[in-house]
Image (spheres, helix red, strand yellow):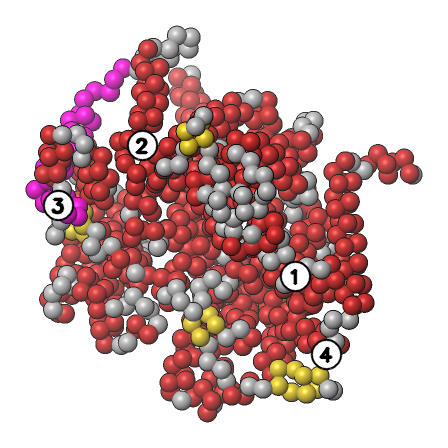
Amino acid sequence: MLRTWRQRITATDIVIWTIGIAIAVMVVYGSAKTLALGKYTTETWIDLAITGLALGGVYALIALGYTLVYGILRMINFAHSEVFMSGPFTAAFAADALVRLGWWNRFPVLSLLIVLAISAGVSALIAILVERIAYRPLRNAPRLVPLITAIGASFFLQYTFRGLYGSGLKGYPEMDIFKGFWMIAGIRVFKTQAAAIIGAIILMLILYAIVQRTKMGKAMRSVSEDKEVAALMGIDVNRTIATTFALGGAAAGLAGILYLLLFPVAHFYMGFFPGLKAFTAAVLGGIGNVPGAFLGAMVLGLLESVGPSLFLDGLGIPAAYQLKDAIAFTILVFILIFRPSGILGERLTQAKA
Amino acid sequence: MDSPSSSPWKQPLQAGVIAGAVSVLLSLVGMVATFKDRFIISGVFSMGQVIFLAPILLMAYSLLRRTAPQSRQQVILSGLFTGLVGGVVLAALVVIGKNVDLQAMFVNSSPILHNILTFNQPLVPGLLILIAICMVMGVLASGIVLLPQRVATAIIQGVSWILLIGLMRDLIITVTSRWGPLAGLVRLFFANSGLKPLGAILLFALIAGLNYWRSGRPAPVVKPAQTKERPLIYYAKWIGLGVLLLLLPPILGIFFSDILDTVFMYILMGIGLNIVVGFAGLLDLGYVAFFAIGAYTMGVLTSPELNADPMTYWQALPFAMIACVVSGMILGLPVLKMRGDYLAIVTLGFGEIVRLLALSDWLRPWFGGSQGIQLIAQPTIGNFVLNTQQELYYLFLLGVGIVAFIAWRLRDSRMGRTWMALREDEDVAIAMGINHVATKLMAFATGALFSGIAGTIFAAKLQSVYPHSMNFLVSINVLSLIIIGGMGSIPGVFVGSLVLMGSPELLREFAEYRYLVYGALLVVMMLTRPEGLWPDARRRLELHEEELEKEAQELADAESAATETTK
């Protein structure tokens, strides 16, 4: 037994495991040291955790698009971060118009619904266009080819929106109902953060229900199992794939509005980092798996927000928050190395990856 | 698609709407207005006009090419109709823009744009002119389809050369300015921006006529290929090219030499990434990381700011190279098992981690944080310091020469064939006994090395490095140029770099839209010509495997049919 185990291990495994264990030790040591130093109070930790959960909610909705598309086409929709950007960037102009009309604070719920609808609509439209123009003709091409078009589409969209709406920052107006904070059991929760968390959970549940309960969702799941058989069963594969892109796009557009609640500035580059993080979240939860995307996003949001202070402060690293993106990417690299199937994924994923 | 029952107007209508939409997009993105003063033919025809008219011409042309042979009248009519629809869509943009305040949202929907689209005329006649010119474009497209091949080719060649020469006015004037009497002759053709109208007509007649005459001659008899003894002219060509490359900086002057430096730096990186992506099929999106590692190693070792005992460029170079190879392997090890999409994302993450670390306050004592590193040593030969753009060009040239030679020999070596086997089918390659660990690591290490060398020269050229110049866009530049040049093709890297890196520098207006255009080019290239501009022979075979098989099958069918009839 020991012998076969020893034969199977290679030099690369040893190197990788050594690096992995070293980082794990560093994280544990850093956390212990930070906690021992007692630089932060419990309240700070809870604040950080709530910030993380709010971010996680946004990531979850974006991650849904990656996961659905991966499930159905076995490809990573690289342009999804730009799909995410297009909706809220457009909606920020609609919000301005609503402010000028005076509706913004007079009919907050209606205004919010309008902005959400515009954001979701634009993102869904862009997602459908990308699928139709850049992916559909290449569905049977070698793997590298659609990936390259995806990167191309991503840059094309980013700079198209830069040209259309300008390269500056576009402020998103604050709503009176989201000003201030609530005290819940002695914990201070900003209303925007609460809205982001609650909104993300509700939207996630609705979207999950669409995938699991409706006929459309059933068609999606069957196409993701086997395109040819699904086509034989009378399912319009092209249309189902387009719907999947639209659904993922709409989710990203909705996420965009929640994101603007947390960070009220829209710009053409706003999709890059959230997109990458959401992808990490999707992989962390197990790509192709909707509940996994939610779980992964929440975990990632927490790690990103609590992580720098917890892991790195104790190691004496100054300005640890600068490294929060680096932490997210490191997590991505390490999941892909040690457990590419993610938290909830099946082992199957490894064969496909 | 072409069901006979559908109305003959449906397809032109579709094409016209799409063409109009593309023109509207290009106008709203700002390209039309940006290029308005870049004249092709001075005072007559600017690049801005080309940008909004070209989609209509091209769309009509591709529509007419696609549809089955029709009568002459039908072709002209559908061309005309496509142009009409496209023109109406564009006119709608102007009308809406004049009446609704679009500029609050679309920053480029300005009076400037409207003036360009209406050809500086009042609204109504301007719109009529716009629609009429769009219709002329449609008719031109049908004209190209209807004319005999030989005439059509001559016209297309003439127009494209006029476009190119008009745009390259500054370069041509600079280069020829030292040619004495010839300079005066060349200047006769050019205005302050673009060509003079008369010059354009003369040039067009010359180029189109030459082309017409050449295509009329019988094709030269193909001599049987000589394998052993190459004719003297073969060597003469290469020697000539080499001499030209050596003479370029004094011919071009400082400004254009600087552009040339950039082009060559990207060739250097392109050849490296070409090994990773083109040969071994590993999509690396974090390629800038190695460029950064090369540049930073050079900075850390040679800058007196960070180092009590700074080294010279040549002393530090081997260390930078070693650092790059090692980091290439460090990246390579964990991603050995990953393929395709996951690999792309992980490498992207790696590139970002390197940048974030260089930027962080944590490592500031070593890498200078956001301030970067200054006072980096410049390369010296004896007592001679290479410090101008023209002198550094030779360093780039030397680097490119060595690296291109290595890549070219590697491609046909055992290692090269192993890479390609791995690219074709990893499982089969491993089953055949290929050591995929060593092979992949070798690809990553070689690619990293070449990129790192480019980084060291970059650091020496600017004498400083900043984390901000190490962003993701550099990786995208390199990736775009090798894909557009042709994946796996070494001449393709040269072509791709010259086109993609040279054009934004030569056409300042274009720089703002470079990533928009690169993105569109990547998509269009993958859809229409995935093998690139200058393809590698083997790669082309792979990508067109199905078509070639189909052709072979048809050929075989025809042969068997022929033998059967003779029986």
Q: Which amino acid does label 1 sit on?
A: Pro
Question: Mark 3 — residue?
Answer: B191
Q: Name the residue under label 2.
A: B249
Q: Position of residue B402 (x, y in %)?
A: 48, 26
- Residues at marks 2 and 1, common chain? no
Q: Which chain letter goes with mark 4?
A: A
Labels 3, 1: front one: 1
Discs 1, 4: same chain: yes
Q: Name the residue rendered at 33%, 45% in the picture.
A: B505
Give, as a three-letter code, the residue at label 3.
Answer: Ala
- Residue lying at the far top of the rendered structure: B229
Same chain for labels 3 and 2? Say yes or no: yes
Q: Regarding mark 1 in the picture, which secondary structure is present there?
A: loop
Which percent across, then down, holds residue B63?
A: 28, 49
The circle drawn on residue A318 is: 1
Q: What residue type is labelled 4?
A: Glu
Residue A291 seen in the current view: no
Residue beneath disc 4? A43
The tag earlier along the polypeptide, 3 or 2, is: 3
Residue at the front extreme?
Answer: B308
Q: Are marks 2 and 4 on the same chain?
A: no
* Distance of label 1 from label 4 (alpha carbons): 22 Å
Element class at badge 4: helix
Quadrant of the snapshot with the C terminus of chain B: top left
Q: Mark 3 lies on which chain?
A: B
User: How far, Cα to Cα, is label 2 from label 4?
Assistant: 65 Å
Image quarter of residue A230: bottom right
Q: Residue at x 56, y 75 (%)?
A: A262
